[in-house]
């Protein structure tokens, strides 16, 4: 649709004089596979999908006016059905940017999980102590700071540091950034007074290999503090060659072996913004035994590490 003049009443007029109304809202996207395959790999008992999201349902939990993408509903019923299909037991639900700082959809999904989900919130810098405590009661165990310009309008480091200094006991921060800003993030990361979890290893170029500049810079960061954890996630985002994700496996397996007590794994379902690819979650699970090649590494990655971060205070 060619949008010409718009007004404040939710109508638009194009160059031909056609009038459109707000019911012509942008198309809602589907970014997940409708029939993911059954993985060949059987996760250990009690396995945790430690990075996933819920979208809506919009009628109950509207998306943020600042959302950079508008997805179809992907609520707790679908998430828990996928969990069971893949052979997992628990979820860590990370507030997605399309819900802004209103964590209601994430809290609703946690409440419906019967204790089998925890969450990571995105909060307004002005959040009160009482609101943080309410999030804790609702199963939240961390806050996420998102530095991806395509997802958020701003990422105020000073305000993030202020919040990081007054989180409830046992919480951590989850940070999402891309490899090109790793160096400039270092000073900020050093000042964070709680454990840090880095999403998708800070998005390295895995085609450079395990000894390439991105992975080496990331290792240097992990070596700078022993309480930086990372999610060895998203071959679908990081390995442009696609399945079987050989570049991802080659770059990430040594990391899992060298930092076995600081790695987490997750599906990333419903794969925000991945509508051009629609990752098959069964195939993603089958990457696990290639990056964590022993039963012990698999137990640490999928059970012990996420349980220590998200269920230790029970
Ligand atoms: O699921 C992810 O980690 C990645 C996202 C979406 C996201 O983080 C968000 O919407 O908050 C992405 O790269 O588009």
Image (spheres, rainbow, N blue to C red):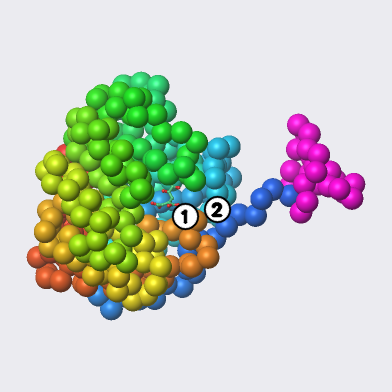
Label 2 lies in ligand 1 vicinity (Cβ under 8 Å): no
Quadrant position of the N terminus in the picture: bottom right
Magenta segment includes 10: yes
| Nearer to the camera, 52 or 60 | 52
Q: Secondary structure at mark 1?
A: loop
Q: Quadrant of residue 191?
A: top left
Q: In the picture provided, is 41 more to the left or to the right than 27?
A: left
Q: CA distance from mark 2 to mark 1?
A: 8 Å
Instruction: Find residue 71 and name its label.
Output: 2
256 versus 285 height, above or below: above
> How many C-alpha atoms fall within 10 Å of the one at disc 1: few (<14), some, or many (≥20)?
many
In the rendered structure, find residue 202 and report the number of the disc placed on it.
none
Residue 290: % across, % down? 22, 72
Would the CB of label 1 be found within 8 Å of ligand 1? yes
Question: Can you say which quadrant of the picture contains the C terminus?
Answer: top left
- On screen, residue 65 versus residue 287, left or right, reads right
Q: Position of residue 313 (x, y in %)?
A: 16, 39
Q: Residue furthest bottom?
A: 40
Which residue was labeled with disc 1? 272
Mark positioned earlier in the residue sequence (2 or 1): 2
Tell me the magenta residue range.
1-23
């Amino acid at each position: 649709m060619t949008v010409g003049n718009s007004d404040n009443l939710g109508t638009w007029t194009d160059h031909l004089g056609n009038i459109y109304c707000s019911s012509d809202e942008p198309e809602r996207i589907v970014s997940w596979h409708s029939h993911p395959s059954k993985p060949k790999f059987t996760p250990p008992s009690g396995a945790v999908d430690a990075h996933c999201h819920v979208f809506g349902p919009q009628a109950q939990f509207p998306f943020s006016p600042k959302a950079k993408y508008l997805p179809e509903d992907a609520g707790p019923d679908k998430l828990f059905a996928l969990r069971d299909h893949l052979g997992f037991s628990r979820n860590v639900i990370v507030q997605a940017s399309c819900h802004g700082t209103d964590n209601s959809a994430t809290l609703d999904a946690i409440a419906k999980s019967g204790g089998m989900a925890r969450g990571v919130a995105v909060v307004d810098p002005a959040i009160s102590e009482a609101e943080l405590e309410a999030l804790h009661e609702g199963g939240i165990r961390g806050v996420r700071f998102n530095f991806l310009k395509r997802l958020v309008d701003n990422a105020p480091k000073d305000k993030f540091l202020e919040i990081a200094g007054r989180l409830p006991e046992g919480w951590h921060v989850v940070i999402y950034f891309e490899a090109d800003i790793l160096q400039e993030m270092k000073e900020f990361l050093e000042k964070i007074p709680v454990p840090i979890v880095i999403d998708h290893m800070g998005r390295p170029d895995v085609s450079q290999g395990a000894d390439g500049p991105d992975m080496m810079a990331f290792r240097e960061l992990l070596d700078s503090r022993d309480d930086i954890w990372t999610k060895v996630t998203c071959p679908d985002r990081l390995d442009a060659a696609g399945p079987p994700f050989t570049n991802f496996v080659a770059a990430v397996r040594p990391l899992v072996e060298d930092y076995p007590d600081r790695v987490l794994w997750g599906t990333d379902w419903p794969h925000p913004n991945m509508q051009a690819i629609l990752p098959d979650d069964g195939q993603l699970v089958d990457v696990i035994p290639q990056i964590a090649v022993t039963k012990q590494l698999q137990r640490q990655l999928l059970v012990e590490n996420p349980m220590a971060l998200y269920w230790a205070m029970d």
